[in-house]
Amino acid sequence: MARDYDVIVAGAGMVGAAIGYGLAGMNRRVLMLDGADTDFRAAKANFGLVWVQSKGFGHPAYQRLSIEAVQSWPKFAEQLEAESNMPFAYERNGGLNFCLSDDEWTARANRLDKWHAQAPEFAPSTHMLDRDELQRRFPSMHLGEAVVGASFGELDGQVNPLRLLAAMQISFQRRGGELRSNHAITAINPLPGGGFEVVAGEYRARAERVVIAAGLGSSVLGQMVGLDVPLRPQRGQILVTERLAPLLPIPASGLRQTAEGTVMIGVTQEEVGYDLSTTCEGAVRMARKAMRILPDIAKAKLVRQWSCLRVMTPDGIPVYASSTRHRGADIALCHSGLTLASFHAGAYAQALASGVFPSAMGIFHHERFNVQKTA
């Protein structure tokens, strides 16, 4: 039997769960359909950074979106933890991007100066710290000889990504949303007169609106409703050590110590298609850089290495678009689902609920990839 909902969200990962959670808090009847655990899930390789420094370089709209999202994160986290009773170790104590040579230091400083100039309405949120200042601020860090300094982003932070995902799914259901796992969508059929029928095997459901947030699976689903978005997978490998005494007080790009004491080392950016293999080459490259920053890591045992696939658009910038062919169908794609979670659960969910999107979001439409049409 077909069942009626206001919105069906295709995908229950970091992006879909945030959207569903937000919609369910607006008195919408929401169904969230998720695929199998064997799907290509970007959340499995999420490094856990709520990060903004230099994000959106060369794309001011994405920069502004990211800054506004991280500014909303403390309130979002407080409410979500209270609703779910699921602590997910969110901290916003700043973040570091280490520089391992004078050339890296100069390049980083120049890049951040240009980044700040893109959005002058925001006060500068990053600062360059030389080695002496780093050691003064963080005396517990035993830095390698190669470290000449780092950029410090005061808005940056970290979170346990899998606990965050669980908290959003739990709270979504407590708000009255329905979550069905192992329901991979096989068809989205526009209905005469409006609305959609969504098919997942033998299961069928109907809704006024459909939001596609299924990661790499979104390409196929989007084509069913006139939303043809080009995507590619990008492999990211991660290493994890045994639990260690505190050695990194705040997270860094590619290096963070979790609340449990393990150290995560990463992350590679490999264009290898849908290959989920882990490689010795990747492990060596990540470990060597980590040891140049924090030599004490050399004493630690590595307990795990894994990889997963990021969801990448051609320019690396998110896509938010509504179908012009089938009104009521939308798509939301990005590789920064963690950082943008507060936006997806807040302003974006509100726009979906009202059907009115800010004009500023037009720059994120996938038609920007259609060179002939935009030329």
Image: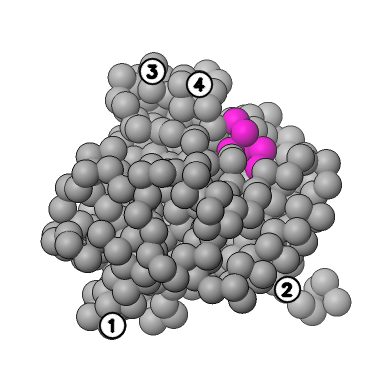
Question: Quick one: SS at disc 2?
Answer: loop
The residue segment tinted magenta is 67-72
Rendered image: mark on residue 281 = 1
Residue hosting label 4? 25
Q: Percent from the top left, x then y, of residue 168?
A: 39, 32
Mark 2 → mark 4, Cα distance in angstroms = 36 Å
Residue hosting label 2? 370
Q: Nearer the viewer, mark 4 or mark 3?
A: 3
Residue under the image location 54 percent in, 32 percent down: 73
Mark 1 → mark 2, Cα distance in angstroms = 37 Å
Q: Percent from the top left, x then y, of residue 162?
A: 30, 42
Residue under the image location 22 percent in, 39 percent down: 260
- Between disc 2 and disc 4, whose residue precedes? 4
Disc 3 marks which amino acid?
Glu
**Callout 4 touching callout 3 (CB < 8 Å):** no
Q: Nearer the viewer, mark 3 or mark 2?
A: 3
Q: Nearer the viewer, mark 1 or mark 4?
A: 1
Give above or below for 314 relative to 191: below
